[in-house]
Structure formats: structure tokens, C-alpha cells
Amino acid sequence: MATETPPSTTTSDKVDEVLETSPSEESRPSNDIVYPSAWRQAAIVTGLLLGIFLAGLDVSIISTAIPAITNEFNSLSEAGWYGSAFFLAYAAFQSLWGKAYKYFDTKYVFLASMAVFEIGCLIGGVSPNSAALIVGRVIQGGGAAGILLGCYSIPNFISPPERVPAIIGMIGTIFSIASVIGPVIGGVFTSGVGWRWCFYVNLPIGGVPIIFIILFFKTPPQSKMSSKATAKEIALSFDPLGIILFVGALISYVLAATWGGTEKAWNSSTVIGLLIGWIVLTILFVINELWQGERALVVARVMKMRDMWVNCIYLFFFYGPYFAIVYNLPSYFQAISGLSPRDSGIRTIPIIGATSVFSFVASLAIGKYGKYTLFEIVGAAISAIAGGLIYTLDIDTSLDKQVGYQILLGLGIGMVVQIPPIVAGVVNTNADKAVGLAAVLVTQFYSASLTITASSAITNNLLIQKVPIYAPNITSAEVLAIGPYDLEARFSGDTLHGIRRAYIDGLRGAWAFSVALWGVAFLCAFLSKWPGHMNPPVEEAEAKSDGEKERVILPEAA
């Protein structure tokens, strides 16, 4: 791990000097950074928090509603797409929205992402069949990608740099809370007014951030590019070939992992062909990104910074296992403890609270400390230990251990989960902030898509192998068709016990996979500079020799 030499004058020192001289907005030169007043900042942040709440909620709200949906549409074979379609779109459209934030007015791009998300929610809510629901989930995910990127980008333009980590910490905390309480809310809706309200609930709530951003946020000059691009250049910058290759690769992987060992043998020509297609399309995507240069979905120039490429590699191995466990812990509580979808979601509240609290505290600490490497090392180590403890969960594990292990995992995750977005927002220039954040968020949700799909495949394949051993009176297909919920109503005695043993083995396979990935993340943390100073780039400095305090001046269009 390399040692980083801290600058002689810290960013916070410069910011403090700027703040000491605070003329009115009208008297400031046009090329000075002018932040909104405190009450406008509060209104804008409130709108962002509501927006990120919706984007996080729909990550998982549908998970406890899937059995009811498949029952209504008779679509058990398509159930995996209800979750993966959202994550696929989340990952695929991050860079597209990043380019939109770079070339167009930040305010109107954010409003457009909210509109796309709301349209997806409406389609999902009124969907007459499974195909329409999947389309709605894709549109939802595409809009949520823009919301998430906007929520992480806008704070950099409404508040001084030393206060941005606190705002991003709040945003990350709300996202964590929303994504983990999603199953609880989804279970409540499904058991009460119906699963369609998992979509309808977003419509009225989504109107609030739209109104707040329209009324209170004005795109600042420093968020815009200094040179105007032509319409052709802008169109080509969205890299349509890259989008096709990226989406094609993800679809090939999801289909192979979903079918492998369940509907088709792993050595079947279809599964092998899909896996080869995933690898080939991924290689072509990387080549295309290098060839496209500034037009690429993930701009290689931004990734040349050590802070960026190390954090993206770290995030790739760290983030996916977290969401994989968030998705499969309710299955443990339903299959092993016999809880309902609603109650299994409630049982995950310890990880909700711990991740949310420690995420916010860590964001404040990083903002104050100004260095991040130690947090990543310790966070990955704690997560791996907590994952190992979760691996020991069994049929008769006590409630206090279930709660304690989740809290420990929440500590490890919370220490780290906000670091890559914070770093990307600090180390990139104003014009590149959205592009840098997009690279981080693409990595984040690509990791989630791969890991959730792989964990599900591991669990299902081990379940298929173990059911004939532990419960020879039934077939694996019967168990897969029924799912983890309500096993006690269908089976009893030794058969029920055997099915639960099979579920434990299947889940442990997925948990072992998560622990291994966190171990790799721990090693990747040592690639970072030590101690990991977050140094903002110098846009343009103007030194004054007449005794005035130094000001950091940005060009009007960065």
C-alpha cells in the first residue's frame, strides 16, 4: 500500500478561508461559487431524500410480493426477472444518465429521471400480465438510476465541500433504510391492499421531490461544460453500442445462472453458449469502452485516477454480497422459522438499523477525518467476520444470535458503503462529477446483479442436490415450486425437517460465496493510497498578493 503525502494546505482550510469572506450573492463575481441559502439547501436536500427513498425502496419492495404475482400471472418461470430486470436497468443506465447530467441542465435531467421512474411505477401497477410487469420494472430501474446519480451529484453543487459528506451520508442512510425495509412494506401491501400497491405508492410520494426541485434548485454554472458540444457529438457520447453490449452481456449471464442446474443442465449447449456469450460480450464491451474514449459509458480517463479504479474494484467485491444477504435472509426466516413475508422482513430490522446508523456516522467521520483507506480495510474485515457468523445460522439458532450477527454485519457495511460515491464526488472535476459517480454506481449495481443471481443459483442448485438426501419422499421440483414460505402448511415431520436442512445447506453455499468476496475486498483495500486523502482537483486558482485571503475560483463553466 503506497503512502500518500498530504498537501501542505488542506481543502477544508481553503474552504474556511473562502467562507470567512461572504459577500452577498449579488455582489459576488459571476465566476465565484455561490451556494443556495440555508433554507433552500434544506428544501433541496428534502427533495433528494424523498427521491432516493423511492429509488431505494423499489430495490427490494417486490421481493415479498413475488409469490402473489406469480400466482396471479401463473409465471413462476419468470419470477427471477422481477428482481433482476430492475437491477439490470439500474446498472445499464447509470452511465447514460451520467452523460445526460454532463451535457444537459442538471435540474431538468433529474426531473426527467423522476418522470421515467413514475411511468415505470404506473406500468407495473396496472400491468395485465407478466411481460408488462417486467417492462415496468425495467423502466423503473432506468429512472431510478438517474435519480440515484442525481441525488449523489447535486449535493456537490449546493453545499461547500466539507459539508457534502454529511449530506451524502444522509442520502446513503435513507437509501439503505429504504432498500432494506422494502420487503416489510411489500409484505404489508401484499397481505392487505394487494401487491400492485408496491408500485402505486410511488406515484403520490414521487410528486413531492419533483415540486421541491422545480421550486428551489437552480443548476449552478460550475456544473456545466466549458465548451458546447454539437448534437451529433452528444448523441454519439451516449455510446449506443456500449449499451447494447453491456445489456446483452448481463442478460446472457442472468439467463445462464437462472437456467443452469434447474431448467437445463450446466453442460447443456444453451447454458454453455450463454456463458460464452457473456464472456465474449463483456470483452467486446471493454474494448469498445477503450476505443470510444470520452464517448464511452465508463470513461477510461476518469478511471485512471487511483482513487477511482481502486474504489471501483473494491466496490465490485464488497457491494454485491451485501445485497445478496439482504435478499436471502428473508428466505432463511420464512423457510426455517416459518415466518410470513411481512414478519421475515421485520426480522431483518437489525441490519436495517445498524447499516443506516453506521453509514451516517461513518460519512460524518470521513468528512471530518478526510481519509478513507482505514475505513475500507476495517469495514471489509468486519463484514467478512459477520458473514462467517451468519454462515453458522442453523435450524435452532437463537434469536439473540440472529440479531447480533446482523448488527455486526451492519457495522461493517455501514463503515464502507458511502465511501466510493463520496470519493468520486470529491476527486473529479465539476464537469466530470456525474461521469465519475456513474462509473461508481455502474460498478455497484453490476456487482449486485451478478452476485444476487449467482447466490440464487447456488442456493437453488444445492437445494436440488440436498432435497433427495434429506427428504426422499418428495422431489426437488416440488420444493422449488412452493418456495420458502408456508412450508409448515404443506409438509410435516421428518419431511419438513429434511426440507429445512436442505434450505440451510443451500443458503450456506450462498453465504460462503459472500464471505469469499468480502475477503477479496479486504485485500483490494490495500491497493489504496495510505492514508487515503480525498484531494479535490484544482479547477483554477487565483492567488492574490495584496494581503487578501486566498480564494479558490472556478471558471463559470467547468
Image: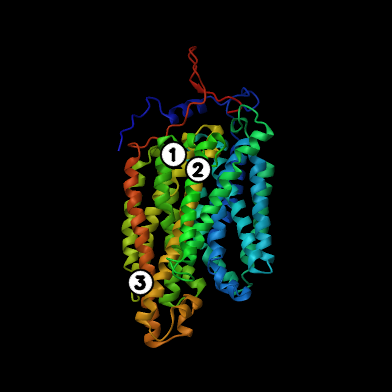
Residue 455 falls left or right of residue 81: left
Residue 348 seen in the figure? no
Does label 1 or label 3 sit earlier along the sequence?
A: 1
Residue 193 falls left or right of residue 429: right
Mark 2 lies on a secondary structure that is helix
Number of marks drawn: 3
User: Residue under circle 1?
Assistant: 308
State the separation of the CA atoms marked 2 and 3: 36 Å
Q: Is residue 405 above or below residue 239?
A: below
Which label was assigned to residue 505? Answer: 3
Where residue 170 appears, as percent x and y from the top left, is 50, 48
Of residues 82 and 371, the one drawn nearer to the viewer in this rendering: 82
Check contact, mark 1 vs mark 2: CB within 8 A. Answer: yes
User: Residue under circle 2?
Assistant: 439
When asked about the image quadrant of residue 420, the answer is: top left
Q: Residue at x 51, y 72 (%)?
A: 341
Residue 240 seen in the figure? yes
Mark 1 lies on a secondary structure that is helix
Does label 2 or label 3 sit earlier along the sequence?
A: 2
What quarter of the picture does the N terminus occupy?
A: top left
**Colouring used for the render:** rainbow
Q: Is residue 197 above or below residue 284?
A: below
State the separation of the CA atoms marked 1 and 2: 9 Å
Does label 1 or label 2 sit earlier along the sequence?
A: 1
Of the residues shown, which amino acid type is indicated by label 2? Answer: Ala
Where residue 474 appears, as percent x and y from the top left, is 43, 84
